[in-house]
Image (cartoon, helix red, strand yellow):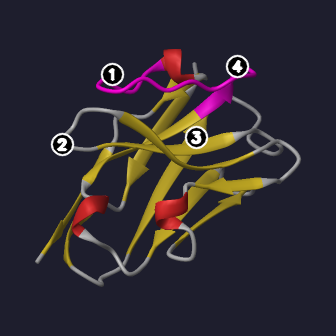
Amino acid sequence: EVQLVESGGGSVQIGGSLRLSCTGSGFTFAGSAMAWYRQGPGNTCEVVSFIESDGWEYYIDSVKGRFTMSQDSDTNTVYLQMTSLKPEDTAVYYCAAGFTGSRTWERGRACGPWVGYNHWGRGTQVTVST
């Protein structure tokens, strides 16, 4: 059974930093396409970043230069280092694996396998306050 467990969320002030972790089990981690999504107050599931199986990385424009995704195959863990946090980064952050081959998006729809990844963690809350 594939399991993903996120940790590292919390409450920080504007400009603060957090490092999210996602530890996976039940699948071959090395070379797997992994992703971080978030779901904010608007309840729309938004991709934050992803790593393809060939190592290519993607970040949404709003986090470029502030967030960095990395993975450690030895510990089956993927990380999201977040710096210069802003109030608009407030959301529940989810780790996803098991890429289906295509990604999709729909305003107001919560995160789940329909997005393009079969496996999801339960999420970790990040709150950025003034």
Q: Marks 3/4: CA distance?
A: 17 Å
Q: Amino acid at mark 1?
A: Arg
In percent of width and height, residue 92 lies at 29, 45
Residue 32 can be seen in this image: yes
Q: Which residue is mark 2?
A: 41
Q: Amino acid at mark 4?
A: Thr
Q: Which residue is mark 3?
A: 24
- Residue at 52% of width from left, 23% of height from top? 115
| Disc 3 to disc 2: CB gap under 8 Å | no
Of 14 and 92, the residue lying toward us:
14
Mark sitting on residue 100: 4
Earlier residue among tags 3 and 4: 3
Circle 2 packing at 10 Å, graded few (<14), some (14-19), many (20+), is few
Q: So how many labels did they put on this image?
A: 4
Of 29 and 85, the residue lying toward us:
85
**36 is within the stretch colored magenta:** no
The answer to whether 86 is drawn above or below residue 26 in the figure is below
For the magenta stretch, what is the residue range? Answer: 97-112
Mark sitting on residue 109: 1
- Residue at 29% of width from left, 84% of height from top? 15
